[in-house]
Amino acid sequence: MPLRKWFYVIYLFSISKNGIAAREIERLLGVTSVTALRMLRQIRASMTQDDVVLSGIVEADEAYIGGRRHRHYGRAGWYAKKVPVLGAVQRNGNARILVTDVASTKRVTDFLKSALEPEAIIVTDESHLYKETAKRHHRFSVNHARREYVRGKVYTNTIEGFWGNFKPYLVGTHRAVSKQYLQLYADERTWKYNHRQLPSLFQPLLDAVARSRIVVSQNAFGYSYI
């Protein structure tokens, strides 16, 4: 693949507000769909979150992506075949997103332990998933079940806004994403969110791509980099 085509795809990637699909790259470059997918995956793999640590007031929440809603099977049925995604967003700051196989208290606790500074204050809903995190951080919560969404500075509107952009991006641009590669798409949206104040994303993205070389993922939820 000529280097100028790589530069062109990276540029398109950097200016696309709602992401760019492999089919569009296929049409623009005249390459196969497999080549287009591979190029986009390698670019997304460079958009890592490893060095992002959140401080101050941090909002945390979980989302469930994909699958169909089963009305007649209760709460468990609603989550059937959906992929849990854990999120934390620092107010007026950065975000950290993790795709996981199960949304458990331990998984949430480990995720926030790696994502938050020890002095960070966490704001969540009333979910029991954050009870262990509350032992390490000052925790405030809003009770969505009672239609409480804002109580002074206690709210989760920032992380809810992130989900409100992430979900339409998946459905509108890509239609469907397998859980095997969902973390890569989460990394893309998070990286762009964390660099949203920059006037142009081309040079930072080009630098990130130049620094990274991807190794094929070993499982559905973990990726290795060298």
Image (cartoon, helix red, strand yellow):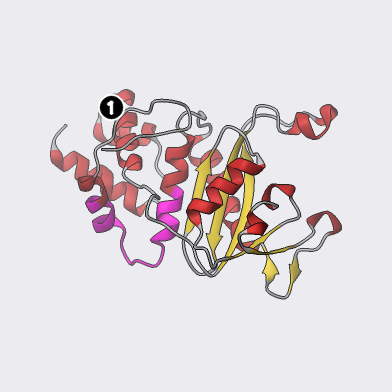
Residue 140: quarter of image: bottom right
**Identity of the residue drawn at 83% across and 60% down:** 147
Q: Which residues are magenta?
A: 189-207
Indicate the position of residue 99 as horizontal and vertical percent values.
Answer: 52, 39
Residue 199 lies left or right of residue 188; in this view the side is left
Considering depth in this image, is 91 or 200 the residue closer to the camera? Answer: 91
Q: Magenta region, mostly helix, strand or loop?
A: helix
Residue 44: quarter of image: top left
- Is residue 25 located in the magenta-colored stretch of the structure? no
Figure check: 180 above or below 149 = above
Indicate the position of residue 182 as horizontal and vertical percent values.
Answer: 48, 35
Residue 134 lies left or right of residue 93; in this view the side is right
Considering depth in this image, is 62 or 6 the residue closer to the camera? Answer: 62
Considering depth in this image, is 124 or 183 the residue closer to the camera? Answer: 124
Figure check: 35 above or below 121 = above
Location of the C terminus (image quadrant): top left
Residue 213 lies left or right of residue 23; in this view the side is left
Q: Is residue 165 visible?
A: no
**Identity of the residue drawn at 47% across and 44% down:** 186
Residue 136 lies left or right of residue 205; in this view the side is right
Indicate the position of residue 163 as horizontal and vertical percent values.
Answer: 59, 51
| Amino acid type for the residue under numbered disc 1 | Thr
